[in-house]
Image (spheres, rainbow, N blue to C red):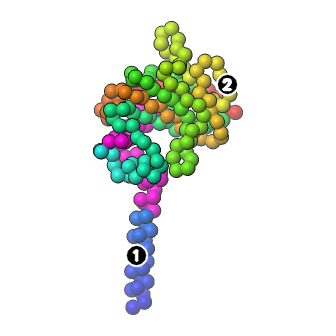
Amino acid sequence: MIHKIFLIAFALSIAIGGGAASAWMMIDRGFGFGAVDVGAWTAFPDRGTPAADPYSRARFARQGYLALGQAEGIAFTAARDTLGQPLSSSCTYQVEGPIPPSRLWTLHAARQGNGGLVPAGGALNSLAILRREDGSFDIPVSRDPHPGNWLRLTGTGEFALVLALYDTAVATTARAVDVQLPLIRRLACD
């Protein structure tokens, strides 16, 4: 009799503990249901829409974020450079290449903290960027100052770059797959 009670209690603890652990991992770790990868950049076009999966909705509610709706824009995040190495604040990077057409875009550095992404430096936007005569530009990302378009990093450890495109046709899943985004090249490390 005691043997059966022990087995039932053991099975229930595995079921309840395993279910709670898997729900926590899905909400805390943010596995990418509906993720669109474009080079080093990842976006979730369904965030902020009724089509978002329940884990994304729970994760955003827990973190207190407001997601961009499809009519508002889309945010791409890169935690690795173009060669697949994690972005480190002890290194200097160059962000270069095309940014899809949009009314406005912003680029900022962020790092994991307090259950979500927190600022890890400065921010740039499309209205305040210095461009060459042909319209192209590059953005150094570093803790050390650089002339021109410099995205300042603060703190230590790994970080991510967040590129938000506002009022753009790229916000739909079909168009997000076919877009070209800037490359993130590592130049040097301390």
Above or below: residue 158 compared with residue 7: above
Q: Which residue is drawn at 34% across and 49% down?
A: 53
Residue 21 visible in this rendered orientation of the protein: yes
Q: What residue type is labelled 2?
A: Pro
Q: Where is residue 159 in the image (x, y as percent from the top left)?
A: 57, 39
Density class for disc 1 (Cα within 10 Å; few <14, some 14-19, many ≥20) is few
Q: Mark 1 points at which residue?
A: 11
Q: Which of marks 1 and 2 is nearer the N terminus?
A: 1
Q: What element carries label 2?
A: loop
Q: How far apart are marks 1 and 2 (CA)?
A: 58 Å
Direction bottom: furthest residue: 1
- Quarter holding the N terminus is bottom left
Q: What amino acid does circle 1 point to? A: Ala
Q: Residue at x 33, y 27 (%)?
A: 169
Check the picture and name the quadrant holding the C terminus. top right
Q: Mark 2 points at which residue?
A: 145
Q: Give the range drawn in magenta.
A: 21-49
Q: Is 93 left, or right, of 43 in this rendering?
A: right
Left or right: residue 50 versus residue 154 is left
